[in-house]
Amino acid sequence: MRKVTPPGSLELQETPLLGVRHAPHLHAAAAIIKALRKGDLWLVDRVYSGVPASDVGFSQKIRIGPMSGRSNVVSWLEQRGIEPNDDRADRIFEAAKRSDRLLEDPEILALIAEARKPA
């Protein structure tokens, strides 16, 4: 995979089949999260997608990065069956705001594990 980062973008990744993966702005993420909470998977699959992800065997994924809202963090946790308590959500949200890119799932899981360790 070849990474392309145009000026002003958080992440733009070229893939052979789908073309582009991007970090949705707050409004797109909010639309996806709202559709998820309503159980409207048809709409989730079409928010800002030229080709529905399910048409090629994928699904929409909520990503967390410096432009994400706290609702992205809560949704990410809920989708994985992890209780989105304030301490956990705040820790991830603050790490995302300090980052200059989208956080990868293992990084987020490490933040959750660190929060569980006794002081």
Image (cartoon, rainbow, N blue to C red):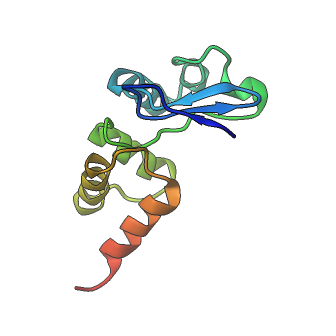
Q: Quadrant of the C terminus?
A: bottom left
Q: Quadrant of the N terminus?
A: top right
* x and y percentages locating residue 89 in the rendered image: 29, 54
Q: Residue at x 30, y 61 (%)?
A: 88
**Viewer-side residue, 53 vs 100:** 100
Q: Residue at x 43, y 68 (%)?
A: 110
Q: Is residue 5 left or right of residue 3?
A: left
The image quarter containing residue 4 is top right
Compared with 31, 65 (above or below) is below
**Viewer-side residue, 109 vs 98:** 98
Q: Residue at x 49, y 32 (%)?
A: 5
* x and y percentages locating residue 118 in the rendered image: 27, 86
Q: Residue furthest top?
A: 50
Q: Is residue 93 left or right of residue 19?
A: left
* x and y percentages locating residue 7 in the rendered image: 40, 25
* x and y percentages locating residue 104 in the rendered image: 49, 53
The image quarter containing residue 112 is bottom left
Q: Residue furthest bottom?
A: 118
Number of numbered markers = 0
Q: Is residue 66 left or right of residue 110?
A: left
Q: Residue at x 67, y 24 (%)?
A: 19
